[in-house]
Image (cartoon, coloured by chain):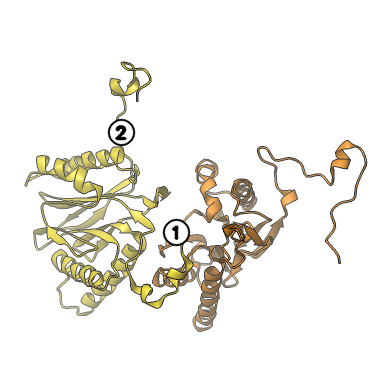
């Protein structure tokens, strides 16, 4: 068989992940494609994973590596919260992720963005790329799709955005990356974290703007040429 | 990346590849102490990914450490040094670790890691003043270490050191020292692909350590030969 159709290839998340601070909290965003070689193993994955009530992490790279790292950190943070008697801070959560990423740098292949809100520092975003460097940033991008977003953010990012402006920026950015990165796709998921709590949002492909050379989706050619047809339905036996 | 190479246990403690790296650090002694300069770039391969990385950090009261190479390893070194300085402070005996001692400690750490084939992938510049004595040294990932009136890492060795050999003097004033370092940094901005035009300069004197805020240097492009380089030979470059 051709090398491309290796269904035993490690699940990689290709991915576009983003974390953005705004005036009052953070917005995390991601695509939903998990690929095994060129096959899309999961077209609706959730790459924004909860670590505590107030801290989430965006995962990219190896699906297995990023899942196991988040599981360990969630376990440690749970114990830490019990011992501390109050919610863990974003900085502590990020450092726990860093420790795992740094001390296992030879074996792990995952880039992570930790984001959350705590009462001491407000909304914070920490990037943890390959190698285990910990870097606090006003916004962070990661995953294979992020290559297409460096220029976009250089131009579009501003300090002190509102919650809605920040979320729109994230959705637009993930959508632009999906348009050009084969390893990113599916839906756009966002998670907004602030003093009031956590909000999850979901933007399916047809709710996203169309970019260059993309066309409005149709039910059928027949609609364009005259005879109306029904919308696609889930396949049934 | 071959997935099998990561699963063999003996490979877990071997020479690694760097991921997020800093470029040159340059240091010079001057009349009142030591001046060290570094830009604020964190490169990810050929991408200039992080542009606000602080690569100069104060160590205790008397020293400053500048690092090039893998940023995660530099962050880990800072943690080791934090522990070292804290332990020294706990003696509460009026004595404090000076630059010579810190450099010696770093040299041992770097050389011993090299012997175990698990280096900290950095080239370090350590400068300071204690009891009126100025000190400037360097140590790198293979344990090579020395002191001099001027030191540099990476590209700085090739572009800055020749300038410093020609223009350095024993009794440079602060202003002359800063101008000399800026001259070297400007050449690096022109000629080092990994350098960015955003830098910090640190001053260490008997009074203590001061690190400048980030700033950018003006660059010169108005050579007439630059304007129309192929005028004499159309079609050439």
Report x, y in % for residue B90: 23, 79
Query: Is B98 above or below relative to A18?
Result: below
Query: Mark 1 to mark 2: distance in Å?
Result: 29 Å
From the image, tell me which residue sits under label 2.
B219
Query: Is B46 above or below relative to A117?
Result: above
Q: Does label 2 lie on the same chain as label 1? A: no
Label 1 is found on which chain of the structure?
A
Quarter of the rendering containing residue B77:
bottom left
Q: Which quadrant would the C terminus of chain A be assigned to in this image?
A: bottom right
Quarter of the rendering containing residue B119:
bottom left
Chain identifier, colour orange: A
Label 2 is found on which chain of the structure?
B
Residue occupying image coordinates x 57% and y 59%: A3
Q: Which quadrant would the N terminus of chain A be assigned to in this image?
A: bottom right
Q: Which mark is residue A136?
A: 1
Report x, y in % for residue A168: 64, 49
Residue occupying image coordinates x 61% and y 57%: A38
Give the crowd class for mark 2: few <14, some 14-19, many >=20 residues within 10 Å.
Answer: few
Chain identifier, colour yellow: B
Residue occupying image coordinates x 83% and y 61%: A234
């Amino acid at each position: 068989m051709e090398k491309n159709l290796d269904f035993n290839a490690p699940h990689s998340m290709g991915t576009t992940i983003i974390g953005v601070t705004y005036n009052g909290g953070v917005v995390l965003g991601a695509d939903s494609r998990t690929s095994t070689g060129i096959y899309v193993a999961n077209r609706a994955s959730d790459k924004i994973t909860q670590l505590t009530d107030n801290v989430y992490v965006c995962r990219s790279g190896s699906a297995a590596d990023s899942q196991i790292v988040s599981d360990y950190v969630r376990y440690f943070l749970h114990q830490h919260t019990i011992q501390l008697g109050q919610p863990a801070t974003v900085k502590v959560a990020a450092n726990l992720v860093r420790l795992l990423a740094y001390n296992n740098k030879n074996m792990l292949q995952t880039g992570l963005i930790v984001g959350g809100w705590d009462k001491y520092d407000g909304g914070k975003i920490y990037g943890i790329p390959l190698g285990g460097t910990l870097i606090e940033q006003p916004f962070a991008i990661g995953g294979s799709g992020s290559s297409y977003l460096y220029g976009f953010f250089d131009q579009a990012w501003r300090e002190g955005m509102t919650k809605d402006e920040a979320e729109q920026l994230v959705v637009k950015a993930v959508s632009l990356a999906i348009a050009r990165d084969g390893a990113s796709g599916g839906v756009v998921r966002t998670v907004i974290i602030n003093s009031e709590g956590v909000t999850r949002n979901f933007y399916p492909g047809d709710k996203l703007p169309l970019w260059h050379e993309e066309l409005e989706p149709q039910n059928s050619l027949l609609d364009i040429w005259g005879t109306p047809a029904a919308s696609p339905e889930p396949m049934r036996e | 990346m071959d997935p099998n190479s990561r699963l063999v246990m003996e490979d877990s403690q071997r020479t690694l590849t760097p991921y997020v790296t800093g470029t040159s650090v340059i240091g010079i002694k001057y009349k009142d102490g030591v001046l060290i300069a570094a830009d604020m770039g964190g490169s990810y391969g050929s991408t200039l990914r992080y542009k606000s990385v602080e690569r100069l950090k104060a160590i205790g009261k008397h020293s400053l450490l500048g690092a090039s190479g893998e940023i995660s390893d530099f962050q880990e070194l800072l943690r080791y040094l934090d522990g070292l300085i804290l332990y020294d402070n706990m003696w509460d005996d009026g004595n404090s670790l000076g630059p010579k001692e810190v450099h010696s400690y770093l040299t041992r750490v770097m050389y011993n890691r090299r012997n175990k084939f698990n280096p900290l992938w950095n080239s370090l510049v350590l400068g300071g003043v204690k009891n009126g004595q100025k000190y400037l040294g360097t140590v790198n990932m293979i344990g090579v270490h020395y002191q001099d009136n001027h030191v540099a890492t990476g590209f700085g060795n090739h572009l800055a050191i020749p300038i410093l050999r020609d223009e350095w003097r024993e009794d440079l004033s602060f202003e002359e020292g800063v101008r000399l370092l800026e001259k070297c940094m400007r050449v690096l901005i022109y000629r080092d692909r990994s350098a960015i035009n955003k830098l910090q300069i640190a001053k260490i004197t008997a009074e203590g350590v001061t690190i400048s805020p980030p700033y950018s240097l003006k660059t010169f492009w108005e050579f007439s030969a630059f304007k129309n380089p192929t005028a004499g030979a159309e079609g050439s470059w």
